[in-house]
Image (tube, helix red, strand yellow):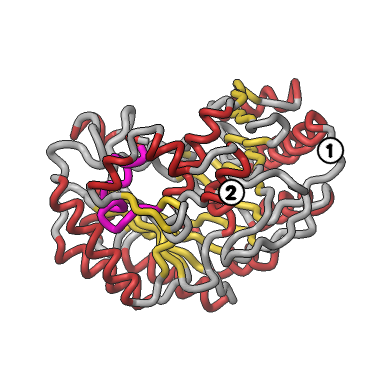
Amino acid sequence: MKEQDDISSGSAGNREGEMEGPGLYVHVPFCTSKCPYCDFNSVPVSDPSTDSFDEEPYIKSITSEFDTVLEVLGRDSFNPVSLYFGGGTPSLLTPESITRVIEHVKKRGGTGMAEVTLEANPESVSTQKLAGYLEAGVNRLSIGVQSFNDAELKCLGRPHTVKEALAAFEAARNVGFENIGIDLIFALPGSELADWKESLAKAVELAPEHISLYGLTIEDGTGFHAVYGSSAGRASVGVIDDNLYTELYSYAIEALTDAGFEHYEISNFARPGRRSLHNNLYWSGAEYIGLGPGAHSFFHDTEWGRRSWNVRDVAEYMGLIESAGTAAEDSEELDMESAALEAAMLGLRRLDRGIVADEFRRRFKISPCERFIEKGGGGLFISQGLLCKKGEDLLLTLAGVLLSDTVIAGL
């Protein structure tokens, strides 16, 4: 984690795709349906086009919570470099609602937002809606494509088709979005390499600026959990074996890097200059405020940092905001050990940086090699070829990337 200098400056950092912070996250929990693999805090709404889906009270809760957080922190303003609308399905909200949030952030000092991202599902957008988001100030779109195979989309419970996904991407380009990311899920039940190759080829052909790849994990409480059982690792037994998972992931790395994408984080690939600023804030340990039910925040108001999180239930969240101004469920103050482990975990995810020795030593008074190799158990990962040294920095090797969960857990 970087040291806290001027966390409200919004000034640019020295490395491509990074900023000094802070960030702002707005959670939009509403969806048209609950996908069977989804473990995110989301709730279905029957028909977002009818009066049964009233956005106004929710937007009021978000802006009110933002004001209360600043008051509790003793700040008159907050100037994030990145604002991220995540979900759920933020594209169920009207452009007018998105405008209200963005304008409210600006009124509280948010004049330095270099990146404003909105997650969108293909079936919930139109040309008119996308144009409205762009006019509101959204300059980065993240489209939940998930697959370019209709059978896989049906398996995942997605309400859109491949045709609709392609149309949504084309519409976003046509209205003027110059920074578009797409999400893909792999390692599905019945996965075959040929299908995955086809999906990746279509993704590359679209020429997005960013691609995120997520291996399917079976989470407790999801629809898939009732069918496939609990997950002991990346994927549940009976869904896909580790060898095929590795083959699918390895092929994706090769195909996307050959196509000119930088594999800058375990799950993320970007065109040069198009890395996600918002995610980089998380990975660098920058401060961020999370608004909405279940949202998490990380503050630099203690020596090693403080984490807090909101209640998950939407109705409870809105009721608490109305009555008390805050919906925080609990908080946790990090100590030096937990902060060091978190810095290592986040650092290793950033593949071309790793755990940067100068930054780590400045913060924790010890180098990462001393902490995790000489005094920890990380030497085994060096000998196995999963970790490597670059000077005093520690980075995952390609083999380590394929077993990143094991390495990170081991540290």
Vertical side of 232 occupied by 136: above or below: below
Inspect the magenta stretch and tell me whether residue 401 lies in it. Answer: yes
* Residue 91 appears in the rendering: no
Q: Which residues are magenta?
A: 395-408
Q: For this view, does 328 lie left or right of residue 322? A: left
Q: Residue at x 77, y 48 (%)?
A: 6
User: Which residue is pictured at 58% across the width and 58% down the height?
Assistant: 277
What residue is shown at x 48% (from left), y 49% (from top)? Answer: 355
Q: Quadrant of the N terminus?
A: top right
In the image, 164 versus 74, the foreground residue is 74
| Residue at 71% across, 44% down | 4
Sequence-earlier tag: 2 or 1: 1
CA gap between label 2 and label 1 equals 27 Å
SS assignment at label 1: loop
Q: Residue 387 placed where, x, y %?
A: 33, 50
Q: For the C terminus, which image quadrant?
A: top left
Amino acid type of disc 1? Arg
State the residue in front, 131 or 236.
236
Query: Looking at the rendering, which quadrant does residue 391 occupy?
Result: bottom left
| Identity, as a three-letter code, of the amino acid under mark 2 | Glu
Query: Which element is circle 2 on?
Result: helix
Left or right of 219: which side holds 28?
right
Q: Is residue 107 magenta?
A: no
Name the side, left or right, on which 331 lies relative to 120: right
Tell me the tag on residue 218. Answer: none
Q: Which mark is residue 359?
A: 2
- On screen, 406 above or below 200? above
| Magenta-drawn stretch, dominant element (helix, strand or loop) | helix
Which residue is the site of mark 1?
75
- Residue 380: x and y in percent read 27, 40
> Residue 273 at what x, y percent from top left?
54, 71
